[in-house]
Amino acid sequence: MKIRIDIMLKEGVLDPQGKAIGHALGSLGFKGVEEVRVGKTIIMTTQETDPAKATEDAKAMAEKILANLVIEDFKVTIL
């Protein structure tokens, strides 16, 4: 089963990488970009066949090691 975990900085947490990308886009002539936020996506394949169990396992992985819960939120999607 394929699982996607999207990890993003929480609202209110400064995102210097997003700010740099936003500035670069403006410098390249892309106007109207108000805010850029950068995150990460992790895609994994597991042997689990039960979607509920796969989701539960992926949430546990994100909470324990993949995301920094102090400054990041995550979302699990079964693909």
Image (cartoon, rainbow, N blue to C red):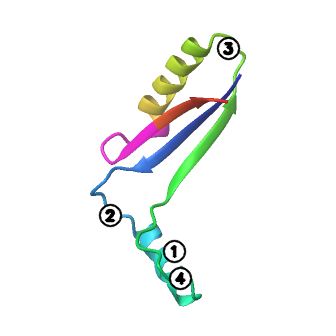
Per the model, the C-alpha gap separating discs 2 and 4 is 17 Å
Q: Is residue 69 above or below residue 37?
A: above
The residue labelled by disc 4 is: 24
Q: Which of the labelled discs sits on residue 48, or is there none? A: 3
C-alpha gap between disc 1 and disc 2? 13 Å
Residue 53 covered by magenta stretch: no
- Which residue occupies the extreme left position in the image? 12
Identify residue for label 1: 21
Q: Quadrant of the N terminus?
A: top right
Q: Secondary structure at mark 3?
A: loop
Can you tell which mark lies on residue 14?
Answer: 2
In 3D space, how far apart are the residues under numbered discs 3 and 4 (Cα atoms)?
Answer: 42 Å
Quadrant where the image shows the C terminus = top right
Which kind of residue does numbered mark 3 sit on?
Glu
Q: Residue at x 38, y 46 (%)?
A: 72
How far is the residue under mark 3 from the one under mark 1? 37 Å
- The answer to whether the residues at label 3 and label 4 have Cβ atoms under 8 Å apart is no
Secondary-structure class at tag 4: helix
Which of the marked residues, 1 or 2, is nearer the chain's N terminus? 2
Judge by depth and name the residue closer to the eye, 35 or 47. 35
The amino acid type found where label 2 is placed reads: Leu
C-alpha span from label 2 to label 3: 36 Å
Q: Is residue 30 above or below residue 67?
A: below
**Marks 4/1: CA distance?**
5 Å
Residue depicted at 53% across the width and 89% down the height: 27
The quarter holding residue 15 reads: bottom left
Tell me the magenta residue range: 66-74
Q: Residues within 10 Å of mark 4 (few under 14, many from 20)?
A: few
* Residue 69 screen position, x and y as percent: 35, 39
